[in-house]
Image (tube, rainbow, N blue to C red):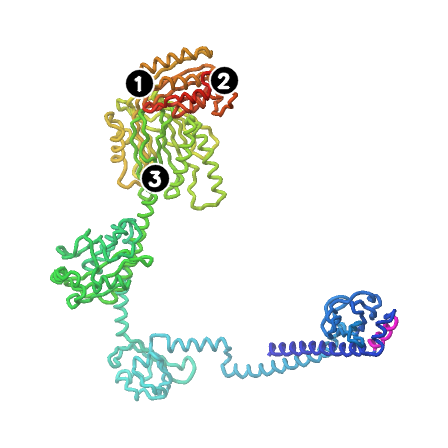
Amino acid sequence: MLLLVAVGATALAVQGLYDAERDAADRSLAVAESFAHAPGTTSALRSPDPTARLQDQAEQVRKGSGVDFVTVLDRRGVRLTDSDPTLIGTKAQGVGRAAMGETFTETYHGRPTDAVRAVVPVLDASRRVVGMVSAGIEYANVGDVLRRQLPLLLGAAAGTLVLATGGAALVSRRLLRQTHGLGPAEMTRMYEHHDAVLHAVREGVLIVGGDGRVLLANDEARRLLDLPADADRRQVRELALGPDLTRLLAAGESASDEVVRAGDRLLAVNIRPTAPYGGEQGFVVTLRDSTELRALSGQAEVARGRLSFLYEAGVRIGTTLDVRRTAEELSEVAVPRMADFVTVELLDAVLRGEEPTGAVHEMRRTALRASRPGHPLQPVGEVIRFVMADTPMAAALRRGKAVLVPDLRTARDWRAQDPGGGRRTLDYGIHSLITVPLRARGVVLGMADFWRGAGSPRFDEEDVAVAEELVARAAVAIDNARRFSREHAMAVTLQRSLLPVGLPEQDVLEIASRYLPARSGVGGDWFDVIPLPGFRVALVVGDIVGHGMQAAVTMGRLRTAVLNFSSLDLAPDELLGHLDEMVTWLDTQTATAEDDDHVPLTGATCLYAVYDPVGGRCTLSRAGHLAPAVADPEGRVTFPELPLSPPLGVGGHPFESGELVLPEGSRLVLFTDGLIESRGRDVDEGLTLLSSTVAQADRSPEETCRALVERMLPEHPSDDVALLVARTRLLKPSCVATWDVPFDVTAVPRVRGEVSRRLADWELEETAFATELILSELLTNALRYGAPPVRVRLLLGRTLVCEVSDGSNTSPRLRHAASTDEGGRGLFLVSRFADLWGTRYAPRGKVIWAEQTLDRTPEPDPSVLFDLDVMGL
């Protein structure tokens, strides 16, 4: 009522305001038109001073008509008269339509004030607009009428509300009296409880009056007692309830769980009087069917057993990420608790870890479990084809759900594909089948067949539901194993593609290597063998934090960085220093990108060693990595104490290097922690085992790798392993020639002659000219622009290497000399006649080297020599 009164009062107020506005508009229009059409208005507008002639008339009209203003405008909209003299001469807004000859009324909002106004054009005899008249009432005065009526309106609304409230109070008192003081919420809740008792519970309810008549019977009571539709208000003796129940109800005495027969049912009856709880004399009867309770109890036991079976299956199936083992676990769980025989077939693509295709009519038997020996079913490994469209297996694949064959002896379709095999199966005693497709993510992975033999009951529909649930869980586990196998294979392939593909050719080290991925996925372990100038070889072993695809990619980035830095021919400690700076920068950049899947480079370890076959020196530097094992030619194994720097990316510490002198035939074993650490042993035990394995002196690097893997690693290691074994060789003294050169350019011809004689001793006369040319240029540069001491060294191996060292750190650079330059062509000549050349820095000074391939030494081009004006150099 309050809402209705408020809405009505609001509607009246809005209507009153609307009527007031319409009245103001009509009155303003009448005044404006009267003034505009009055005699003399047109001539006054054309007079020299319209304001003097019209101002008094306009004010008289305003006061007499009751409007707030009457304004005369010229046809441009400039005020000629106005009730406010200060506005005369100003331009009125929004009167353009009147200037075009249109009469209009509007509610105007703007300066000088909001108003309801009418604007009427003043026309001359030829119907041309010579001016305009605007009359109106200020908007603030429009609502005066409404305000005068508002007290009466509010009083009427209040009176109506008081009357409505009084009527509602009278009605409420009467309703409360009739409902015993219960409000609407209590009445609704009582009705809901009453309805739930009568229709929702699985017990029969009868309310019988004191005279023995049935007052109320719920649906369950009508079902249990087979009551007729007109049972209400009838005597219980007239309802044919059976002698025992009729006697019990007619007595009207309290009873608790009295079991009486009613037809073919045994009912547990409870009777309680209604008098103590209010109402008329009578009693309430509850009925419970004990026969159904016993049946339900048995069904609950069966259901509990099946739930326990499915729970056990969920725990036992999928314990490994192996496709074949998961299929075997499915068969092991189902036999003998559900079936006597279980066979599992999978697509070959699934067994290979690939995505299954749409060709599902040919599978390979992957698992078979039997409760008795000598069964006639096809063994594991055979190909099973589903070529007959009417067999249960083909039908299950086509429908995508289980197919039940309760009695194989009466069914013919399942024998259509292999009549002989079907006959042997029946002779063996197998008589019932459930075939279920293995499906995951809507894709068929294989088939699971459940068979029962002699002494077991037939399968029924409830067994089908259990089989489908069991197979669904197994399918998810098999698909997870398949996807893991595929992703693991992809990660291993990626990592192997990032690792060295074969070992580079070189003559100073006999090398063997191994990489073994972890059981749970590939990691970031890696190794590398990098040939360096001067027949030196760099050996690298590293370990990245984490596992998986990201770790493999991170390893690839780090390996590429090492390859790039090694091309600068840096010392091991300098190389690790640059690598540490790069790791810090990369991790900083990745942290700003907020990549959750990123495997950090910080914490990676690395061991970098450079072996020089001239003298057998090996310089090593390590960043958080394990020291290598060194086995001398007699088989004695040591772990040299080398300076240890923090892992890469930690920063704050300089990198140091150590030096070893390795006799020819020594074995250098570089490895990652996965080789020596495991759950069953610590690092010290692993190092001891490694030492005893490497101690046999007669083993080659390949045999050493094989022995270490077989003795120290399980079939599937928990961590990935990188292993590198190198046996050292020395460059023969006869293949090394060294000259100390005085710091005098006149010594160049003498050294050149000695080099030529040594090349003749090595039977390399065909390379003499190119070698002398290269030596002359390098040696001349060292003497002119370098610093003492100056040394020349020739190394003979599969290639010929010429090295010139001096005490200066200034590196020459290749440039193109102008045609008028007297020099600047030396390094260009070196680059033309050497296959490779470059510079490396020593602790004091530098070494410029040039390498020539012996089997294809380029012959000098006389035209090139002429163009370069070699003779003038």
Whether residue 196 is visible to the viewer of this picture, yes or no, is yes
Label 1 CA crowd tier, 10 Å (few <14, some 14–19, many 20+): few
Secondary structure under tag 3 reads: helix
Pointer 2 residue: 785
Which comes before the other along the chain, label 3 or label 1?
Answer: 3
Specify the principal SS of the magenta part.
Answer: helix
The x and y percentages for residue 673 are 34, 35
Q: Amino acid at mark 2?
A: Tyr
Q: Is residue 90 magenta?
A: no
| Along the viewing direction, whichever of 779 and 342 lies nearer the viewer | 779
Pointer 3 residue: 497
- Magenta stretch bounds: 52-63
Which comes before the other along the chain, label 1 or label 2?
Answer: 1
Q: Amino acid at mark 3?
A: Ser
Whether residue 312 is visible to the viewer of this picture, yes or no, is no
Pointer 1 residue: 732
The x and y percentages for residue 486 are 32, 48
Q: CA distance from mark 3 to mark 2?
A: 45 Å
Height in image: 259 above or below 433? Answer: below
- In this rendering, which labeled residue sits more in front, label 3 or label 2? 2
